[in-house]
Every structure is written in C-alpha cells, then in structure tokens.
Amino acid sequence: MARRLVPTVLREEPQYRLLFGSQVLSVLGDRVTSVALPFAVLSVGGGVRDVAITSTAQFLPFVVLAVPAGVWADRWERKRILIGSDAVRLVTQTVAAVLLLSGHAEVTHLVVLAAIFGAADAFFAPAFSGLLPTTVSPGNLQPANALRGLTFSLANVAGPVIAGVLIGFAGGPGSALVFDAATFLVSVLLLLPLRPAVVAQAAVDDEQAAPPSFRSSLHEGWQEVRSRSWVVGYLGGFSVYHAIVLPAIFVVGPVLMQDHYDGARSWAVVTALFGIGNILGDILLLLWRPAYALRVGALMLVGASCQAAIIGSHLPVWGIGLLELLTGICVTGMFTLWETSLGEHIPPTSLSRVSSYDYLASTGMIPLGNVVVGGMAAIVGIYPTLMMMTIVGITAALVVVSIPSVRHLPRAPAIAGSSA
C-alpha cells in the first residue's frame, strides 16, 4: 500500500529521486523567504519603494545573465552549476540572517545580498531545466515536471505558514532566512552523488571535434527559439505575465496587506490558499496527459492573468484567497505543460539555451514590471493599477491562445527536432 502511494516516477527513476529530494526543502526555504524578505525590508525602516528595489535587485540578474548562463549550462557539467549556485545562496542567506538577527541590517545590505542571490539563481534555473530530462525516461517527463511543480505547490502552502510562525514567534524575518540557508546545505549534500545520463555531450563526442565557440552556441540557441512560433508566442505571453501581472504578488500584495489588512498573517492566508490550488493542479497533471499540452497551458495562462484583479478586489482575505486557489491551479498547470513541451520537442543539447530565453522572458521581466507598476501605483493609486494590470495580462494571454502552433502542437514520446 505504501509503495503504491509513491509516484511511479520516484519508484522508477533513482537519479530523479536525488534531484527531486535536493529541491524539496530548498523550494520550501525559498517560499519562506519570499514571504519574509518584504517584511525584512519593512522591519529595518524601508517602505514600498524599498520593497520594490529589493525585489528588483533579486530578479535583475536574470536580465543580464540568463542567456549566457544557458549557453554555459549546455557547455559545462550542469550538476556542478547547481551545486555552485546552491553554495552561493547558502552564503547570502546566512549573511542576511546574521545581519537581521544582530540588528545591524540595512536596506542596502538586503538589496546587495538579494542581487547576489539572484545572480546565483540565474545560473541555477537553465542548468536545472537542462538536467531534469537526463534523469528520467521520456515517458516519465511530464510526471517528473508535475512532481517538481508539486514541490512548489506544497511549499506555497507550508512556506507561508512556516514564515508566519518564524516571523511572528521565532525571531522575525532573520530566523526565516536561517531556515532557507539550511535548505541549501541539504540540497548540496543530495546533489553530490547525482549521476545523470550524459546526453548533452554525446553529439560533440561523436564528432570528435572541439565544442563551438560561445558566440556560435549563443546563435544556435536563438535559432532554436525563433524557428518555433509556439516558443516565441509563449515567451511573449510569459513576458507580459511576469512584467505586468506578477508585481501584484511580489510588490503590491504585501504592501496592500500591510496597509489594509493584517500584514504578514493575511498575506500568508492568501499565498497558502494559492498553494492549495497549485497542489490540485499538480495532482491533476500527474493523472492527466492532455493531447494538446500547450493549448491547455495557454488557456490556463488566461486564468493566471486574473491575479492582479483578485488582489485588488476589496474582498475579505478569505475571498481573495479562495479566488487565488483557482489561479493557483492555472499557474502550476501552464508552467508544467510548457516545460514538458520544451523537454519533448527541444533537442537536449540546446535545452538549457532555450530555457534561458524562457527565464529571460519570465523572471528577467520582473524587475521592469516592479519599476513600471511601482511608478504607476504612485501616480494613479494601487487599486486602479491592479485593474489595468489585469486588462493587459488577459489580453496578452488571449493572443497566445490565438497562435495556431500553440493550439495544435502534438505530444511527442521522444525529442522532436522539427520546427513548428
């Protein structure tokens, strides 16, 4: 009975078990920090502008480093990149925690440490995307991505609860960062024995030739992107979603809860219910393999783009949270189906480079969005800004749905090299 409760991908894929295990606690720690960091800034005398600057500092490195990091992840050993990234973030979170707990933290310290954290994360993301398919068989790719998504979902529920307890009863935001630092240590220990399949280097080894130059690799990665209209379309939709919709979560939401609700406790309720929606969406995709993954994912992008309006709906906290539960299903579904489609249709030797454009168009857009949304909120007010964010986000998502190659891209049991 107990064995049947363990997902098949964990039973059949020992290398994926290590990769999955390394991320479970690390993702939980990151979710704790995502709640704690805005309140850490506020606790040292910062305001909404300082919260926006700190968030921007964390995500800005993606703009500069995402694409080069993808090239290097296709050229270097991806496992070592993951370990190095985790080690750097272990140090940044430890330093930030010590400064906060000792009472010596300033907004400038938190901004600088957030930027270093973001730089390490920029290297981690494309390397992880390229590494995951090398730890599973092709048939287990969607379950592996769904299970990875489930770790984010569970963390979205447990993380805010843990953050609320640590912030409210165990020493404030600094204690939350101690927790995050410990999770990176565990991740490093589990990644060390990982032995993924050596797929990415096979083509080079067979040719007995020197690897292409950095510039050539960069150009080849861009060609893989632009030759597929479904990739270009999704990247455009994700850019709008991350630049226009997500600042409602990273900047406006915590400030609105601080000013009009019950601060961190109210925000924890909203984010926890969002996480429950994530869990439901991940369980759905562990059981259901839609014939047209991108079509379903694009429709879910439309639902996800309603988040700004929900945050600014003036509803009680539980009403906002229950609507966020529905968007949580959409958010995890669109990301899982997108990442699975990349793994099925992009050659493994190019997957990190293509994923790097994904991270550039998504996470890399968050700093721009924080600046734009922060300035707009200061001019016209928070609530009108949230409504305008929703209109722009939903319009962009509907454009993605309208792209024929998005609606008709089939599933592939193995890597497909053809363009769409």
Image (spheres, rainbow, N blue to C red):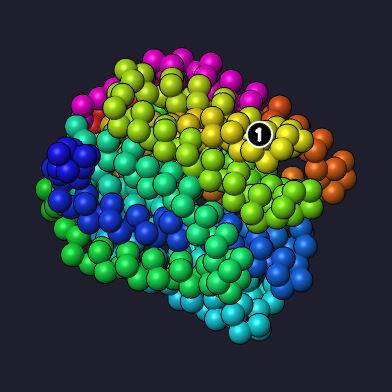
Let me know if residue 401 is in the magenta part.
yes
Q: Residue at x 15, y 39 (%)?
A: 1
Q: Which residues are magenta?
A: 394-414
- Above or below residue 384? Residue 356 is below
In front here: 263 or 15? 263
In front here: 154 or 395? 154
Looking at the rendered structure, the secondary structure element under dot 1 is helix
Q: Residue at x 37, y 23 (%)?
A: 293
Residue 405, x across and y down, in percent: 42, 18
Q: Residue at x 59, y 51 (%)?
A: 268
User: Residue 78's image quarter?
Assistant: bottom left
Q: Residues within 10 Å of mark 1 (few under 14, many from 20)?
A: some
Residue 21, x across and y down, in percent: 28, 56
- Above or below residue 307? Residue 189 is below
* Horizontal side, residue 218 vs residue 65: left or right: left
Q: Quadrant of the C terminus?
A: top left
User: Residue 2's image quarter?
Assistant: top left
Which residue has dot 1 on it? 319
Q: What secondary structure predominates along the stretch shown in magenta?
A: helix
Residue 388, x across and y down, in percent: 76, 32
In front here: 179 or 381? 179
